[in-house]
Amino acid sequence: MRKLKDALRLKFDSGLSHQQIAGALGISKGVVTKYVGLAVAAGLD
């Protein structure tokens, strides 16, 4: 759950790329894309 929150914070607040977020959090770029896609679908931004 923590990495999900961090990924969304880095994407929407800091405007980092998915590659940069993945490197910072130690997760794959695909996971970042999935998290961001789900957040956008849920109406979060």
Image (cartoon, helix red, strand yellow):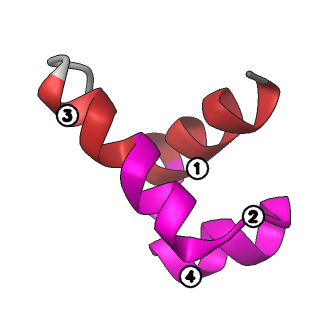
Q: Amino acid at mark 1?
A: Leu
Give the vertical position of 7 relative to 43 (above or below): below
Q: Amino acid at mark 3?
A: Val
Q: Which residue is mark 1?
A: 10
Mark 3 crowd level (few <14, some 14–19, many ≥20, 10 Å Cα): few
Q: CA distance from mark 4 to mark 3?
A: 18 Å
Q: Percent position (x, y) of residue 43?
A: 15, 18
Residue 35 tag number? none
Look at the numbered disc 1 and give the secondary structure of its residue. helix
Q: CA distance from mark 1 to mark 3?
A: 14 Å
Query: The C terminus lies in which quarter of the figure?
Result: top left
Magenta region: which residues? 14-35
Pointer 2 with pointer 1, Cβ within 8 A: no
The verdict on residue 18 being magenta is yes
Q: Which residue is drawn at the image coordinates 26% and 20% (left, top)?
A: 44
Q: Which residue is mark 2?
A: 27
**1 and 13: which one is in front?**
1
Pointer 4 with pointer 1, Cβ within 8 A: no
Mark 2 crowd level (few <14, some 14–19, many ≥20, 10 Å Cα): some
Residue 19 tag number? 4
Q: Earlier in the sequence, mark 2 or mark 1?
A: 1
Q: Earlier in the sequence, mark 4 or mark 2?
A: 4
Q: Which residue is mark 3?
A: 40
Classify residue 12 by image quadrant: top left
Q: Amino acid at mark 2?
A: Ile
Look at the numbered disc 2 and give the secondary structure of its residue. loop
Q: Nearer the viewer, mark 2 or mark 1?
A: 2
Mark 4 crowd level (few <14, some 14–19, many ≥20, 10 Å Cα): some
Q: Percent position (x, y) of residue 16?
A: 50, 68
